[in-house]
Image: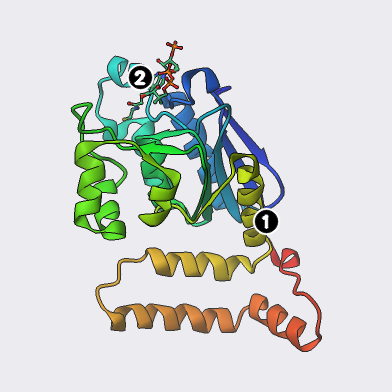
Amino acid sequence: MTEHITVTDTGGVLEIRFDRADKKNAITSAMYTAMADALDRADADPGILAVLFHGAGDSFTAGNDLNDFLSAPRSVEESPGGRFIRTIAKARKVLIAAVHGSAVGIGTTLLLHCDLVYAGRSAKLALPFVKLGLVPEAASSLLLPRLMGYQRAAELILLGEPFDAETARDLGLVNRVVDDAELLAAARAAAASVAALPPSAVQQSKALMKASHASVDACMAEELQRFSTQLRSAEFKEAAQAFLEKRPPNFAKLRG
Ligand code: COA
């Protein structure tokens, strides 16, 4: 437990707030553990459809706490930070981020594992790993080049210069840039939209997009398998019946 992570269940959406504003929400081991625990809980709870990350004060997060890195020089694979990045990579629920102010290191690489990312105009992202004598983490050396092309990723990773919200959007890392005052509302509205969708269809679609299919044939085979399952589901029955009865669908009643 840590007072620096606040987890709130808002009914269908679990909000995780970095709550260490005086240190720009730099993330300690205890904070990684609290977040990984919350994500495990979200994945296990059929009532939770989405997880929303945001930061208190003027920052999203300044990344890993550098004191923590210095004072705990152990294998990062086994560290709470290692557990956290493995947990976000395999999360079944929809991950959403509302980014404002500084988003450094894991504050940027975390976004590669989010499904929807909203940025306030104040957002300033950076990947200063090389400048710090480190290397990229959270599979960012794979996912960044895949997302934006090698040279664009190489510039961000090798030079480590900060970039703004519009640049992040143009590079494909951010869905939408909004005024800071509207940021949380925009992200919460997206989370509420996700929470109103048929849960299994959402999770199956995310799983399909995250799978590394080797070929079109392999992708189609898995899609058709999941499609057949969804065709027999209570979710499809409710959606089709609602259409035919000219009423809005109610998927909330199908949650476990
Ligand atoms: N680890 C530990 N403490 C951090 C921190 C981090 N990653 N980032 C900020 N802090 C602390 C500062 O030491 C300072 O503490 P103090 O008030 O006790 O002196 C406080 O947070 C405020 O930071 P400050 O640098 O004064 O704020 P700023 O608005 O001028 O700059 C940042 C904000 C994020 C640009 C700057 O703090 C920064 O570059 N932080 C380091 C980012 C980093 O390298 N992260 C690791 C990536 S792997």
User: Does the Cβ of the disc 2 residue fall within 8 Å of ligand 1?
Assistant: yes
Q: Secondary structure at mark 2?
A: helix
User: Does 23 sit left or right of 250 as displayed?
Assistant: left
Q: Quadrant of residue 219?
A: bottom left
User: Does 243 sit left or right of 178 as displayed?
Assistant: right
Circle on res. 68: 2
Q: Quadrant of residue 165?
A: top left
Residue 141 drawn at (x, y percent)? 23, 48
97 or 69: nearer the viewer:
97
103 or 29: nearer the viewer:
103
Q: Tell me: residue 103, above or below residue 233.
A: above
The answer to whether residue 89 of the structure is visible from this angle is no
Mark 2 or mark 1: which comes first in sequence?
2
Q: Residue at x 23, y 26 (%)?
A: 132
The answer to whether residue 12 of the structure is visible from this angle is yes
Q: Quadrant of the C terminus?
A: bottom right
Residue 221 drawn at (x, y percent)? 36, 82
Residue 89 drawn at (x, y percent)? 39, 50
Tell me which image quadrant ligand 1 sits in. Answer: top left
Q: Which residue, given by chain and number where applicable, does mark 1 sit on? A: 192
Q: Residue furthest bottom?
A: 244
150 or 30: nearer the viewer:
150
